[in-house]
Amino acid sequence: MVTRRQARRCERGGILLYLLVLLLLAIVLGLLYLLRGPILLAGGDWWVVDDELEKAQAIVVLGGDSVLGDRVRHAAELYRQGWAPRVVLSGPALRTYFSEAELMEKEALQQGIPEEHLIVVRHQARSTLEEALALRPLLAEHNFRKIIIVTSNFHTRRTKRIFRAVYEPRGGHIFVSAAPDPEFNPARWWKTHEGRATMLLEFLKTLYTFWELRDLPAVADPSPQAALPPPLFASRWQLGYSAAEWGRTGTR
């Protein structure tokens, strides 16, 4: 039978254990606070994927570029360095008569990429996965097996996961190259409202990607466009025009 003295000892022991746990928790939280800079910096560096590149058949620029056109500028620099001979510009419709891909084309031409080396793809993709699926017929048509994907730095980790899931099981080889973004600096993203908001949104989208990719086989086969709504208008490659022929049609 437990005596009153033994009960008091057990009670004191429980209180001491509780206080010890609180003390350890406070120490851990204090260390995390003091080391928050290096920890958040390491997290930002890890989040950005910038692969060591190999010579590829095409550079693919994803839609959703910054207002400064950083993705196109970065792709143009890779093109000038000789990493690939063709540049694919992918973008959704901005209006029924104009798309982001056409805006990217104007920027690419200004950056010195010859028109005959550009492939412009307009689509209605609403997510990175839908964009990867929308691009697949074009890449298969041109037999682009090794491609460099250019996207904003904060978007690279999710992009690599999605494009590897879509292309590598079919023999494709994917590299991801990070373009700078004015709203996300990996070295200080936690110090600005835009950086924190960008990281939070991209983190949530990355979590959703794990769920989204579960249905990839059903979405991707047998029709690569199964998950996409009907296009508003065809892309150049769908119409069968070359870059020069498209320029002569007056339908830009």
Image: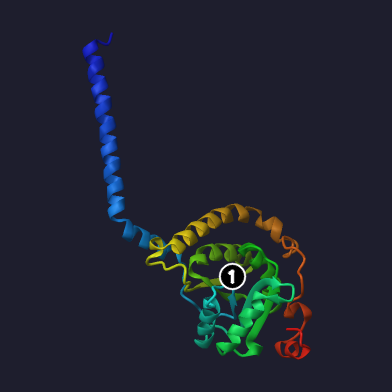
Q: Is residue 201 above or below residue 138?
A: above
Q: Where on the picture, by quarter, is residue 134?
A: bottom right
In what quadrant of the picture does the C terminus appear?
bottom right
Query: Residue drawn 76% across and 70% down?
Result: 232
Residue 144 falls left or right of residue 33: right
* Neighbour tally class for label 1: few under 14, some 14-19, many 20 plus, Cα within 10 Å: some
Query: Residue drawn 26% across and 15% down?
Result: 7
| Most foreground residue, 30 or 148 | 30
In what quadrant of the picture does the N terminus appear?
top left
Residue 7 falls left or right of residue 227: left
Q: Where on the picture, by quarter, is residue 46?
A: bottom left
Q: Position of residue 214 (x, y in %)?
A: 62, 53
Q: Is residue 184 above or below residue 235?
A: above
Total label count? Answer: 1
Q: Is residue 11 above or below residue 112?
A: above
Residue 65 falls left or right of residue 233: left
| Most foreground residue, 88 or 33 | 33
By what rule are the colours in the image chosen?
Answer: rainbow
Q: Position of residue 55 (x, y in %)?
A: 53, 81
Q: Position of residue 251 (x, y in %)?
A: 76, 84
Query: Does residue 174 appear anywhere in the picture?
Result: yes
Query: Does residue 143 appear anywhere in the picture?
Result: no
Query: Residue drawn 59% across and 83% down?
Result: 107
Residue 231 falls left or right of residue 8: right
The residue carrying mark 1 is 64
Q: Amino acid at mark 1?
A: Gly
Q: Position of residue 118 (x, y in %)?
A: 64, 84
Q: Say what secondary structure mark 1 lies in.
A: loop
